[in-house]
Each structure stands twice: as C-alpha cells, then as structure tokens.
Image (cartoon, coloured by chain):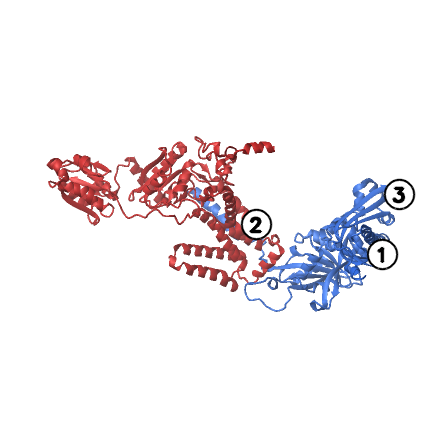
Chain colours: A blue, B red
Amino acid sequence: MANRIHRLGYASVIILSLFCTGCWDATEINELGIVVASGAELENPADPKSDVKAYVQVARPSQLAGGVTGGPSPSGNQKSFVLEEGTGPTAASAITTIQHRMSRRFFLRDRRVIIVGEAYARRGLSDLLDEMIRNPDARLRSYILVAHGTTPGKLLSLSYPLTRLPADAMVELEESHQAVTMNVVQFLKVLTGKGDPYAMGIHLLRSSVSNHGENFGLDDVAVFKKDRLVGWLNDRESKGFYWIQPQSKQLRRNSMAVSVPGGGWLTSQLVILNNVILPSWGKNGPRIMINLEVTDDILENMSRLKLDQPSDTKISERAIEREILGEIVSLLTVLKQKYHADIVGFGDLLFARYPRQWRTIETHWDQVFSRMPIQVHVKVHIVRSGLIGDSIFSKSKP
Amino acid sequence: MGKGASGQSSARSASSSKGDTRPHASEGFLHSEEYRERPVCKDIEHNEELLRKQFEKCSDVIFRPFALLGVRKALLVYVDGLVDSKELEANILKPLTTAQGASAYGRDATLSSVEKYILPIANIEPIETLSRTVTLILRWQVLLFVDGEEKALALSISKWPQRTVTEPETEAVIRGPREGFTENVRTATALIRRRIHTPELKMESMQIGRLTQTQVVLCYIQGLIEDSVIKEVKQRLERIEIDSVLESGYIEELIEDTPWSPFPQIQNTEKPDIVTAFLLEGRFALLIDGTPFALIAPITLWGALASPEDYYERYLISTMIRWLRYTFALIALFLPALYVALTTFHQEFLPFSLLLSVAAARENTPYPAVVEALIMEFSFEAIREAGVRMPKAIGSAISIVGALVIGQAAVQAGIVSAPMVIVVSITGIASFTVPRFNFAIALRMLRFPIIVLAGLFGIFGILFSTICIVLHVCSLRSFGMPYTSPITPLSVQNLKDTLFRAPWWAMRQRPSQSNKANPTRQSTSTTPTHRIPGFKKQKEGSE
C-alpha cells in the first residue's frame, strides 16, 4: 500500500511538472518577424563619428504565400516586406532600438543579405561583425554588399519584379556566378588571415522599362583594407579580379568582346578557366607567378577572321590573351599602387608556402606587396568556334 | 479495489482446493453434489422427469419419445437448431422406429446393439451419468435414452447455420490465398491441417469459460517449437478462470506477458496461410471457437510491420515496401509532434521558403500549434472511428463531411492552418500503412503524449519520448522472445527477414530465435550457384 502511494506520488510529481514548464522558449511561428535583409550606414555620412542608422527588412508572410492562406488577407499591391530603421551608436544597438519598437521578435536566421553604406564601410565593419559572431541567432552565411553611390535605405526599399522578396534577388545575383561572392564567414576568414577582404558593390539602376524606373544590380568590387573600405575597382579592374579569383572557375556566361587586328569585334565566352597562382621566394624577396589557362568558345564573329583557319584562330587567341592580360595588369596596378590592399590573397599563399620567411616581412607586408614582382601568363584556347567559319557578312560581301 | 481482488483470490483457492470437482452453481442442479454422480436410471420416466426439470422453460430443448423398434420406450433429447434435423430423421429415427432393424433383433435390441449395428452415425458415445447427459445436450449432441438401460447414447450430428469460408476483410492481399477462418473452430483446424501434412502438427483442445465452455485449440508443430514455450502456454491457459470467452481478445489479454503495454505482444489473424507460416517458423497458434481470429505468438516488433504478401511477392519489391512501412510507421508516430516542435521552438530548422509559407498559413489561426495538432488528430481519430462503426450506406456522407469540414472549411475559416491539415492527413495515411491494426492503434495512441511533450519541450520532448518508447519496447517479451529481436539482441543470421526480405532460396534456416532444435528449412539446391548452369564457372572466370 505504501509502495503504491509512493508510486502515485512520483507519477503525479512528474505529470504536474510537465504543466509547470509553461513551454519554455516556445514561440509560435507567426509571432516572429522574419528578417530577410538588414542594412547599416552612418547617420551623417560626412561625419565618421556620427551614430549608425540600421535598416531591417522584415518579410510579411501573409503577402508572400500563394493560394489559400487561411482567413481573409488584405489584398492589393502591398509590399511583401516592411522596412524599419533605427539609430544607435553601433549597428547592433541600432537594431535593438528597432526591436524595441516592433511587435514581433526578430528572427535573424534567414537574414541573407547585409548592405552597408559606403561611409559606414569606410569607418569599418568591426562592430557589425562582432555582433554577428556573438549573436547565436545570426547566421554567418549572410552576404555582405556595399551600397555604391546610393544608400542602403534606398536599396532596401525597392522591390524586385522577379522575386517575391528583394533580398532573394540580391542572393540570386550573388550566386549567379556572374560576380564574386563574399559572405560574413568568408569576410571573417580573410580578416583573420593575411590578406584583405572585398565585397560586391550594389547600385541603383535607372531603368526606363521596369519597376517604376528603379532597380538594383551588382556592379564593381569594393576593396577593403582590413575591415575598412578603401575604394572601388572600376569595371576593367573588376574583370581582372574575376580572372584570378579561385572561385571564378565557376564563372560562367562570362563573355567578352575583343577588337581584333584588322577591324571588327569578336565575342568569346568562357568555357573552362584554370588559374594558378604560384608564390616563390628568391633572393630579393617574394615573387608571384599567375598562370591563366582559358578555354573559350566564340559567340559572335564580327570580324574578317576565318575561324576555321588555324592562323586566324591564333590571331584571335592572341587578341583575347592581350585583353585579359590588360585587365589583370590594371587590377594589380591599382591594388599595388593605389589601395595597397591584397584582396587576391597573395599573403596567404606566401605564408602557407614560406611560413618562416613570411615572419620577416609580416610587419611591412603592404610595402612588400607594392614592390613585389608579379608575372602573369595567359594562354587562351578557342574551341567550338562554330562550323560556319567566317562571319556570314563576309560572304555576303564579295 | 484491493478488497475485491482479495475476495476473488480466496474464492479461487477454495475451488482449486477441491480439485475442480465442485460444480459451478450455474451448471444446474443435476451437477450439484446430490445428483452429480447419479447414473442414468433404468426407469426412463424418471430420467425424463429429471431432465425436464433441469431444462424447465427451455423451449428449444426437444424431448422426442418414441418406441424403439416398435417395442421399448425410448426418448431423444436435443437442442433444436443445433442438430441436423434431416440426419436425425434419416439416420436415427428411421432405423430405430422401422422394422428394418426389428427383423434382425426384435425385442432384444439392446443399447449396445443399437450402437453397434443399427445407427449409421460416426460419432457415438455411451454415457453413464445424468449430469454428463446434460452437458452433452448443451454441446449439440442428441441423447438417446432407452427404457430399462442404465446408459444413454450421445449421438453427434450437430449442425447449425454457418458462414462459409470467405476472404477476410481486415487482411486483404493482392497476391496470396483468399481463405479466412470462420467462427467455427473446426473450420480453422481443417484449413490448417489441410496445409501441413505431418502428424507432428499437434492440436490440443481445451475448454475455457465456465458458461461458454469455449473450445480453444493450441496448435503447434512438435519438434519445431521448444517444449518450454508450449509448457508455458498451457500453464497460462490453465490459469484462466472466467465466465466466458467470446473472442480471442479475452484470451490475449489474459495470457500476454506485459498487460500494461500499449504494444500487442500476440498477433491476431484471420488467415490460415499466416498461421501456417508462423507454425512452420516454430511458433504456436491458438484457435478459438466463436471467432475467426486466431492468436499467434511469440511475435516481434518487426513482425507487426510485415505483411503476408512480403513472402509471396518477389523479394526486391517486398524489401522496398517493408522499408516504406518502417518509414511511415515512424511518420505515423512522430510527424505531428515534429511539426509542433519545429513551428514553436526550432524555426531555424525550416528552409526559408517553407518558413514563410508556414508563417503565412499560421498568421490567422487562433490556437498555438500544439493545441491545433491535438484538435486535428483527435478529430481524425473520430472520423476513423465513425468510419468503422457507421452503416456502409452512409459512408460517403462521413467522407464528405470529413473532407469538407475538417479540410476545406476549417482552413478557409481560419480555424486551422493548411499545413496542419496536410500533416494530419499524411499521418493518417501513414498509420494505415501498418499492416497490423492493433499495432497501428498503439502508434496512434502514443502520438498524443508525444505531441504534448513536443509542445512543452520541443525536440527535447520528442527525443525524451523516443527514448522512453525504445526502452519500453526493448524490455518487452512475447513468450520469452525479446520483442525487438533479432536487432536487439543482435542476431546477424536472422536479419535476413527483418530489415530486408531475403530471397526464398537464401532463407535456408528457420529463424533461430524461435527454434534451435531443427534449424534447416531447405537444401541449397535452389541457390543460383546450383540452379543456373554455368553460374559458378562465370563467376570464377570473372575473378
């Protein structure tokens, strides 16, 4: 009998304790504010000491789901997201001030894009990154973009005609293999390594055909010196950067138009890219050799060259090689002489290969980098030039 | 409750101390101390008087007096409707009343000569006590009394309305025998005996139930099953003292190993081919009169997820379908709980698009996910139950109401979210993929506490309940066989019929967990090496 009472006691304690939990940490999914993108810029771009203004783009699921959503939903052309802004001394505190105003708890897991303003980036991203590392909710796979010639607020308020959320479009642009990607993890990895990070710039497109004339797109590469933005690569330099990036091996649909000797244009498309950066250490310090092997096919031949002739193929290959070489050289020149930033990651390669020698130059790596000789070899093969040989226009003209 | 239990046990000990000779009060006054041993009287009037008194107000008990071969007084007593009246007329009354036999025996026809020469009846038994005649009348026999004889004859010509052998509805198969047991235990024994031609197939009969005297046949193949198991079963059956056994479920609950468990430890089936297969694997079956359901034991968890068709279809199909069932058994158990845990605690597990869809669907729902899940699962169980009970004619009404009200209307009214309906439907379908209905019910019941725990603790709650279930299942035994064997305790050799169904030619050994005495099932002559000419050579050549 006593035994039974004991057992009953234990059982009731266990059962009652179930109802005392009050559902720890439980949050219904519809009580979350799903943050899809955030932005940060200086309140007064001219003053580096000013407060940080943060933007948070929160998805509105009721506007996003298709079909029966349950219950009446306000129809109409409402935006699929809400953009909120707040200010604080740092990016993290600015987001906190927004959170205090919002009815829903921020859910940062799906923040996929962080857009930083140019002025804020020039001041340095350290406070933003520190918050990202510490906050268990934040995921480090968010892409970092730098607003180029505009503000994050402006960019984040635009909706994109092709995707439900503009942040989705930004992610798709980053992942489309038409640009080099940079997310928080990669950024931190570079920062803690020997090189300097970079990020893609995002800018406003004035388009007369869609979306009330405004849209956004990725453009140039932003060059950082440690966590601070120091400048931009222009179009030609950015292309040079793509060529020697390891991740560019997947860079598809990268077509380029080259003017060939004898007049006319030739548009080639990248098929296979093989780029190797070889560090070496001579008497005069480190040297770098960049070997580039490019396999191209021809998209368009608007020249007099007959591509079924090996000699003409050679000519076009040389022309493309010259173009690529020119782009890379202009990139290296601007990096070495203007920004003194090693965004290609030569430092990491040297350190990996020559850790002992690296110590001797570690402190003045910028200067060494600026003076370091870099050899570039480019080899282009044209395959699949098309069976029609020369341009159809050359046939029509006698 | 404690008082009642003690009273019952004292009554039992009293009855067993008398060696079960004491008649039960409900057996009538002829079984009482006074009359029990009283022999059949020479005076037929006296016998009739006592029997009429015993069967007072029993309109279906017929007393048919006649003159044996036109001379001696005789009496037939039987229960109308339980004996074959045509046979009674042709094979009993006709030879006994006409002159056909009289020419040979005349007045001297004694009961023993009637038994030996006159009656063309296969099953005749001389009876000496009156109490025994009562028992036999109630067991569908015709009792013949003759004036001046101290014995009576029990003539077995029983017949009553019976269902024919049909396909069992609860265990439909695409490929395989369509026969099913009927309510008559003889049909069951016949269907099994027809399949197994060995005298080692034993069918031990016993009566259980004081009032129903239900015949229970313990069926096994001697030499394939361990004697200790049979001994244990008999002991457990002998322990039963109950008024009635109306269905196999009575016996199942009275002899199973762990009465508190939600998991069935004895399998029931209507199909003779299943029983036969189990017997041949060294298990036993209990055939119970009055129900088409036979009991089989010992069984394992994996057996609950196997269908007889697994053995009739080709092995690749069977293996795939088996995995499908394993997967869906888990879905039936965990899916709603997982949905609750993910949407209330672990939103980060959901892919972005799914998160948005679920969030949108849940935007207007009034209840938290856990309450919603409980309501929906509860309604689903109600629809299922209603579907079983209702007359077939209004079946379509229920399905319309179920689909429309629970599905469409509830979502459109914003009372439940659409993903919840999907989850509940998938769970419902999943629970019907489990071939054993009683096992599926166990899964359905366990689903509810898991949902509650998931709502309180999230994934932690699900894991906790999983651990509890695994511990419990591992501790279960069915007549000494671990419920989870051959996975735990691991027996690699027996896995061939658990995680996958090996081809028949590879299953050369019987499952060793049930029988160690006689392990070999077939010779190696049908393995591809022996069967296909040149198979061995090719293999050697390629190597």
| Mark 1 belongs to chain | A
Q: Is residue B370 above or below residue B273?
A: below
Q: Work out how far the residue at label 1 is from the one at label 3, CA to CA, in angstroms.
A: 39 Å
Q: Quadrant of the N terminus of chain A?
A: top left
Q: Residue B444's x, y, as percent?
A: 47, 50
Residue A2 percent coordinates (x, y): 43, 42
* Disc 1 versus disc 3: nearer the observer: 1
Tell me the tag on residue B459.
Answer: 2
User: Image quadrant of residue B26?
Assistant: top left
Within 10 Å of disc 3 (Cα), the crowding (few <14, some 14-19, many 20+) is few
| Circle number at residue A284 | 3
Figure check: B225 above or below B469: above
Q: Chain letter of disc 3?
A: A
Number of callouts in the render? 3
Q: Residues within 10 Å of mark 1 (few under 14, many from 20)?
A: some
Say what amino acid the circle numbered 3 marks.
Asn
Q: Are marks 1 and 3 in contact (CB under 8 Å)?
A: no
Pointers 1 and 3 within a single chain: yes
In space, the residues marked 2 and 3 are separated at their CA atoms by 61 Å
Q: Which residue is mark 1?
A: A261
Residue kind at label 1, given as amino acid type: Pro
Helix, strand or loop under label 1: loop
Toward the top, the furthest residue is B517
> Label 2 marks which chain's residue?
B
Report helix, strand or loop for mark 2. helix
Describe residue B6's horizontal placement relative to residue B45 as left or right: right
> Which quarter of the image is occupied by the C terminus of chain A?
bottom right
Q: Do we see residue B12 in this rendering?
A: yes
